[in-house]
């Protein structure tokens, strides 16, 4: 079944608990962490993850858009993340391996993320040790951008690699996912869809979550 991970980047930060309750029929809470260096925006960090942890039973999918994430993965795990994803572009291959190992040592799931310009092959060094691969369908940094349809061949290529080498690994897409773009993601091979603005702008959030499942 297709899973939905609403991004709280589009929630009202003054009412985060209320806005997390609104997505209780989803499968993950997607938390976008930005440092103003890896991406040109600053969002939320460790104290916020800690505060939202008791407000939901859904797993927290923490997307780290920060340089050298190995420095902070332990703290995000301790704050309550269930899944922590790190960008392959954010450090050396060796340090990305170290970050994944640290997340696993905390008993949490680890994932890697690829930006739009990063090719599918960049996942190969990590493919067999991660629980999730995230393919960005916008340039990371902001919610509300247009979906990049041209990422679909990459999603399909990574789906093929996952099926061959690590079939339980999840394949997530993030950026511009809405009722008119969700089906193409699912057909391409994604099984987890992140959606920020299309969920939080909907008049009926539950209905929108159901609609995005395709
Ligand atoms: C972008 C973030 C996304 C973003 C998605 O850097 O990683 O998770 O919140 O927002 P929408 O769904 O509005 O494109
Ligand atoms: Zn994200």
Image (cartoon, helix red, strand yellow):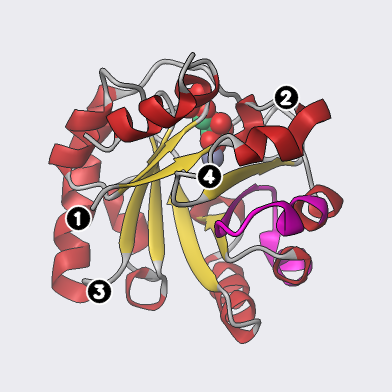
Residue depicted at 29% across the width and 21% down the height: 179
Which residue is under mark 1? Answer: 159
Can you tell which quarter of the image residue 121 is in?
bottom left
Q: Say if mark 2 contacts mark 3, CB within 8 Å.
A: no
Q: Say if mark 1 contacts mark 2, CB within 8 Å.
A: no
N-terminal of the pair, mark 4 or mark 3, is 4
Find numbered disc 4 in the image and state the secondary structure of the residue it sits on: loop
Q: Say if mark 4 contacts mark 3, CB within 8 Å.
A: no
Looking at the image, residue 167 sits to the left or right of residue 64; the answer is left
The boundaries of the magenta stretch are 51-75
Looking at the image, residue 65 sits to the left or right of residue 78; the answer is left
What label sits on residue 166 in the rendered view? 3
Location of residue 100 in the rendering, given as x and y in whole percent from the top left corner: 55, 73
Graded by Cα atoms within 10 Å as few (under 14), some (14 to 19) or many (20 or more), the crowding at tag 4 reads some
Location of residue 164 in the rendering, given as x and y in whole percent from the top left corner: 14, 71
Does the segment drawn in magenta span residue 71? yes
Which residue is under mark 4? Answer: 24
> Foreground: 25 or 188?
25
Can you tell which quarter of the image residue 143 is in?
top right
The nearer-to-camera label among 4 and 2 is 4
3D distance between C-alphas at marks 4 and 1: 28 Å
Graded by Cα atoms within 10 Å as few (under 14), some (14 to 19) or many (20 or more), the crowding at tag 2 reads few
Location of residue 57 in the rendering, given as x and y in whole percent from the top left corner: 60, 59
Which residue is under mark 2? Answer: 12
N-terminal of the pair, mark 2 or mark 3, is 2
Can you tell which quarter of the image residue 155 is in?
top left
Does the segment drawn in magenta span residue 120? no
3D distance between C-alphas at marks 3 and 1: 10 Å
């Amino acid at each position: 079944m297709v899973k939905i991970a609403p991004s709280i980047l589009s929630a009202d930060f003054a009412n985060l608990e209320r806005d997390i309750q609104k997505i209780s029929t989803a499968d993950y809470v997607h938390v976008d962490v930005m440092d103003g260096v890896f991406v040109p925006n600053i969002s939320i960090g460790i104290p916020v993850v800690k505060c939202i942890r008791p407000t939901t039973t859904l797993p927290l999918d923490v997307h780290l858009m920060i340089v050298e994430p190995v420095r902070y993965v332990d703290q995000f795990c301790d704050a309550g993340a269930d899944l922590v994803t790190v960008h392959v572009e954010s450090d050396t291959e060796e340090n990305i391996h170290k970050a994944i190992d640290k997340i696993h040592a905390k008993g949490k799931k680890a994932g890697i993320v690829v930006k739009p310009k990063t090719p599918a092959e960049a996942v190969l060094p990590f493919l067999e040790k991660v629980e999730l691969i995230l393919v960005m369908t916008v340039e990371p940094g902001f919610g509300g951008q247009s979906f990049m349809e041209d990422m679909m061949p990459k999603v399909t290529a990574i789906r093929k690699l996952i099926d061959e080498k690590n079939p339980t690994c999840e394949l997530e897409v993030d950026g511009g996912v809405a009722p008119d773009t969700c089906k193409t993601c699912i057909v391409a091979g994604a099984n987890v869809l992140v959606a920020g603005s299309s969920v939080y702008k909907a008049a009926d959030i539950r209905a929108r979550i159901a609609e995005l499942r395709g």
